[in-house]
Amino acid sequence: MKIKAVKLRISTAQGEYGFKFEFSRNLTVIRGSNSSGKSTFYNTLLYGLGMEELIGGKGEKVLPYAVKDYFVQGEHSVTVDSSEVLVELENSSGRSVTLRRSIRDSVRQVKLVEIFEGAHLTEDIELSTPQPTYLFDAGSAQKQEGYFQFLERFMGYQLPQVPTTNGGMAKLYLQTIFAALAVEQKRGWTDYIANIPFFGIRDPRIRVTEFLLGLGVFERQAKRAELDAASMSIDADWRKTYDTFRQAATANNILIEGLSPTPVSTLDPTTVLLLKSDGRTKISLQEQVSKLRGEHARLGEKAEAYGKATGAEALQELETTSAELQRLSVLHERATTNLTLQKAALDEIRLLLAAANEDIERNKTAQKLRNLGAQMELEVATDHCPTCHQEVDDTLLLGIVTGPQMDLETNIAYLDSQRKMLQSQINGAVEEIRQSEIAVTNIGARLAATHDYRNSLRGDVSTGVAESRAIVRRQIQIELELSNLQALEVQAEALVAKFKEIADRLAANQVARRALPKDTYSSTDVARISLFEKNFRANASSFGYESADIANIRISLDTLTPILSELELREIRMKVQTSLTADSSASDFVRLIWSYLLALYQTSTTRGYEGHHPGLLLMDEPGQHSMRPASQRSLLQLLIAQKGLQAIVAASFDENESVFMEATTGLDFKLIQWEGKVIQPMVS
């Protein structure tokens, strides 16, 4: 992408003021003194691009008062009635658009950016009907009407999703990319990629570097995120299906065995069992159905012979039923008592787990404080008295407890194993309680049915009817239970088939996850980083970096920033890595930033290593900390030498003509400078 021109238009009672500049497709140098409005020009350009967050805020408040309130013209103060900035852009396919954004306006808001087709500033094409877009509000980077979405498409980007600090995923917003393309004067030269706006992105500087270099990490991250999302869906589907299955089984007082409540990748449907429990023994669902059918048949036989039955036989049936009722009452009482004890035991284990967790946290805190003390070389942290320097036992129980005592690390490990054991016991106790609850419910249902049957028998005996109401009542109960169990059987078959399908999905997910590279960067990525490192070293050498031996500089695979390694043997033994930020002089560190930003472009445009650099670099006062003119000249020479790179450099050259001449003589670039202030009357 190329910035072709910028225009600031200020309307006042005295006429129109502002500035208009066109830029070279290669190097443009903006020369102005520190009080001439050079930063006003630079910040207005960023504002027109919608990138003022790089300066430190949103909206017109980041701009100087001269473009929105008033400015001094000669000896007079001129009030600003309205103001706007226009920026003309061209993308890689040759399409030109003109952006218009108000700074001070009674109608148009600063969040509005109007897009006009055509080169209005450089070719005087009339402004047509604009495409309105908006900034900063929700959706400005995703929706069709959002400005950042427009600019992303215009630049030919499809920005990836990246991890956030809260564990989710978010877009690598365009403003983060521009932090590596536009360096402002105040804070821009404090880091390799400084002033990245906060969007909750984890390690944003690394993500920006990865994107510009075209590393394949985003595809792998996207695949991993896709697998993570699929894994969450699998877990949700399994748990939802399990809850449905358990509720249906519990409603019929049936236990489920052979099925995990959490997803598994292998499942044999024949191992999933539905069981009926009476508190002592368990039988399968099929056996329960057969048992009920047998009881129903026997009751039918009794019903046929009921009219011929003697009173003694009826009394015998009543006595047998009463005995069964008493037996079920005892079973119900035992099952209820057992359930109460299990719940009490679970509460005790949970209290023990809470105590173990608290002990672990206390020990970890003590260990952390001790380690910090050791790092600060406090003698008490190394078990020595700070006064007499004798050894001190790390315990308050010396002389009370005999035998060996655990240190903090061993104690933490012991408590952690105890915590895992208690958690395992809790999981087992919860499952036992669930089964006991089903058994209590099952016995209670049988107890109620037997109680009803006995009452009906008593009525039969007392009235002497020819047809037993007790038998009919019990048959109806059996028929209803059989109907429910048969429906459960059909439902269970469908649900188990669904569990098998979910298990297969999990197995496929695990296979795909194992196929992902274990290392952060592939061999192709490492080759790109190696080229980036070579370009960085070459640039640092060209710029006269002197604070360290350039041959020992490398790009860290952990941070993608330059580090200085010690000799290999020392690195292996001591693992010493020195940050070049700390070990460089102020001017030398700025040279490293130049080298870094330029190497991003050089690597991204190397054949076979193509990345996503848009070919644009804006620098405000790169000659920081009284940089030598020779170094500034080397920077300009390298910027000119980069085919396809548009560089816009705003600099004062120490407000010294000889410095400017030494840095620029003989170089091919476009110079923009002005007399006095940058804001001047506009010529029609």
Image (cartoon, helix red, strand yellow):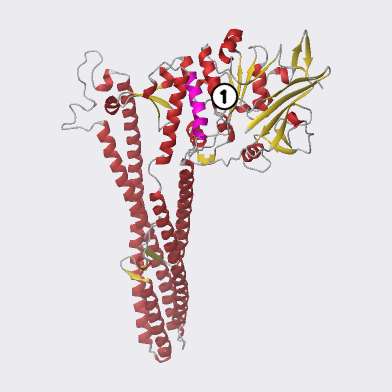
Q: Residue at x 44, y 32 (%)?
A: 531
Q: Position of residue 169 (x, y in %)?
A: 51, 41
Q: Which residues are magenta?
A: 590-605
Question: In the figure, is residue 288 to the left or right of 399?
Answer: right
Q: Is residue 49 visible?
A: no
Question: In the figure, is residue 345 to the left or right of 158?
Answer: left
Residue lying at the far bottom of the rendered structure: 308
Q: Amino acid at mark 1?
A: Ile
Q: Position of residue 51 (x, y in %)?
A: 63, 29
Element type at marker 1?
A: helix
Residue lying at the far front of the rendered structure: 666
Q: Quadrant of the C terminus?
A: top right
Q: Position of residue 163 (x, y in %)?
A: 49, 39
Give whichever of 33, 224 is nearer the camera.
33
Q: Is residue 416 above or below residue 322?
A: above
Q: Position of residue 646 (x, y in %)?
A: 60, 28
Q: Residue at x 68, y 29 (%)?
A: 4
Rendered image quadrant of residue 285: bottom left
Q: Residue at x 71, y 16 (%)?
A: 678
Q: Circle 1 sits on which residue?
A: 640
Give whichever of 447, 563 is nearer the camera.
563
Query: How many residues crowd around disc 1 within 10 Å: few (fewer than 14), some, or many (20 or more)?
Result: some
Tell whether position 597 is magenta.
yes
Q: Quadrant of the N terminus?
A: top right
Tell whether position 413 is magenta.
no
